[in-house]
Image (cartoon, rainbow, N blue to C red):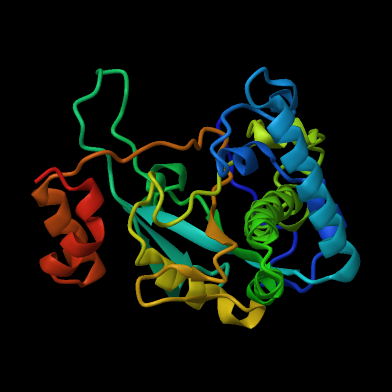
Amino acid sequence: MPYLPQAPHKPGKHVFKELDLKILSTYIDWTPFFLSWEMRGSYPGILEDAVYGKEATNLFNDAQSILNRITDEGTLKANAVCQIFPANAIEDDIELYTDESRQNALAKLHFLRQQSIRASSLPNMCLSDFIAPKDSGIADYIGAFVVTAGIGCDALCKDYEAQHDEYSSIIVKAIADRLAEAAAEYLHELVRKNIWGYIADEALENTDLIAEKYQGIRPAPGYPACPDHTEKLTLFSLLNAEDIGVSLTESLAMMPAASVCGWYFAHPQSQYFTIGKITKDQVIDYAQRKSMTIEECEKWLAPVMAY
């Protein structure tokens, strides 16, 4: 049976201020926390690891103590915003519309396509492949989101540093990062089950969420499937992300640093992939699509250029 896109149950922009940190804590994936301390191994197994076990356990206990203090005192704030937009693909671009009439374009998202030589059974993928083409007559949708758990992080770190406690300051930054990722996980679940509602009966444990066993993906601008950071400008404009306290630096990094943004795709075959290296012909085409100079595109796409 062919996949038919579902209209969102709750259209419009959804803003969440001061998400409950105790709820977000239950969505934390602790494995990257230990990796940030150069301890390799999956949580909770790393706590019993022959090499790292004792050190990992002490670190985890310290992190839990600081996390409990943060959640009790509310020294960090977590905010989020998301929206599901009517959309259709036009080749490697995705056009967003102001409403369900699809008569007026709201914005256009630009994506890149894999150019590596692959087996005949493996297509060169582009994220636009997961959205119905405009000429198909199928009404499709794409979501956008920004979350942060970094509000208050700098002030809290400075408090610890003033006490010459660099160790706790580093833990706070790592916890803020984990809470931001947890907020992204929490919001995505809410979108799938309630706001977009394309899989309202989903029932997954946190381990399933960490293993990405749900339907859909949330790729972020600047990451392997969409490596162009300048697409954040469109995303932030669509959602007025500054309203939840998140802004972009000149180099398009997010501030606070403990923030996550991206797109929601609902297609059951949507998957993460790496664009890999691209050649100049695609860079030229991409520059034309984005109304940018080739030199400007080359600046932002330098990590994935094959020349």
Residue situated in front as seen by the camera: 206 or 143: 206
**Is 165 on the left-hand or right-hand side of 65?**
left
**Taking the image as drawn, is residue 76 in sight?**
yes
Give the residue drawn at x 41%, y 63%: 95
The quadrant the N terminus occupies is top right
- State whether residue 98 appears in this view: no
Which residue is more in the foreground, 200 or 303? 303
Residue 202 lies in quadrant: top right
In the rendering, at what x and y percent does residue 195 appear? 74, 58
In this figure, what is the number of numbered marks? 0
Toward the bottom, the furthest residue is 243
Give the residue drawn at x 57%, y 74%. Answer: 239
- At x 73%, y 45%, the residue is 28
Query: In the figure, 297 relative to 155: above or below?
Result: above
Q: Pick whichever, 155 or 150, lies toward us.
A: 155
Q: Is residue 199 left or right of residue 20?
A: left
Place of residue 280 in the rendered image (x, y in percent of width and height, measured from the top left):
10, 50
Q: Is residue 141 above or below residue 45?
A: below
Q: Quadrant of residue 107?
A: bottom left
Query: x, y percentage for residue 12?
Result: 67, 71
* Residue 216 image-quadrant placement: top right
Q: Residue most toward the front?
A: 164
**Residue located 58% across and 63% down the image:** 259
- Where residue 158 appears, x then y in whole percent? 65, 74
Give 172 or 305, whichever is nearer the viewer: 172
Q: Is residue 114 above or below residue 84?
A: above
